[in-house]
Amino acid sequence: RACRGMTLTVERLHEVIHYDPSTGIFRWRVTQGGRRAGRVAGGLASNGYWRLYVEGRSYRGQRLAFFYMTGEWPAGLAEHKDTDKLNNRWSNLREAGKVENGYNRGKNKNNTSGFKGVHWDKGRSRWIAQIVVNGKHKSLGRHRTPELAHAAYAKAAIEFHGVFARIA
């Protein structure tokens, strides 16, 4: 049995928590302290992720779901495919490295084109398509419309980022 200060085992996790892979919801299996069996386990953290305290330690929901389902902690990150930090359905989670997780980001908040990977070149009055590959910016050309530039970005994202490509 895992105790406070010791590493949580998947067996102990299964004893105290039930995870429903189809909904992504965690529920307590046992009543202890102020926690009652059957109640939703965890809560929303200030960073927008679902956080649970098990055996005195804090865990992000997606990492705990990964451990619950596989019996192993993800080697890198447990990523939300749809980027929704609260969607802990098993079908929405995957293991990713830091670089792959970055590929799955949406467009920047300061984006003015409305398209990921596209910005305006004031000097040439054209839309530039650009993608990051292996940590380096790669130009995908200048285009007359933001839609054409985005099409170039989308094609490159699929080619270079594969299943981690996020087009929007």
Image (cartoon, rainbow, N blue to C red):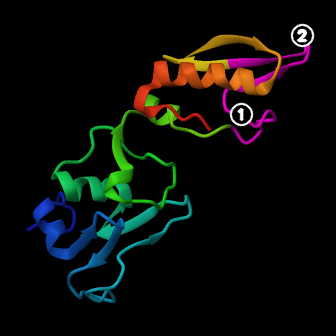
Residue position marked by numbered label 2 in the rendering: 124
Residue pictured at 69% horizontal, 38% vertical: 108
Which tag, 1 or 2, sits closer to the chain's start? 1
Question: Does residue 112 belong to the magenta stretch?
Answer: yes
The location of residue 134, given as percent across then percent down, is 48, 16
The correct choice, above or below, for 159 with respect to 10 in the image is: above
Residue pictured at 10% horizontal, 64% vertical: 11
Magenta span of residues = 108-129
The location of residue 53, given as percent across then percent down, is 34, 69
The location of residue 19, given as percent across then percent down, is 26, 68
Residue position marked by numbered label 1 in the rendering: 115
- In 3D space, how far apart are the residues under numbered discs 1 and 2 (Cα atoms)? 19 Å
Identify which residue, 102 or 145, lies in the foreground.
Answer: 145
Left or right, 50 with reference to 167: left
Identify which residue, 76 or 154, lies in the foreground.
Answer: 154
Image quadrant in which the C terminus is located: top right
Q: Quadrant of residue 154?
A: top right
Image quadrant in which the N terminus is located: bottom left
Q: The disc labelled 1 sits on which kind of residue?
A: Phe
The correct choice, above or below, for 58 with respect to 161 in the image is: below
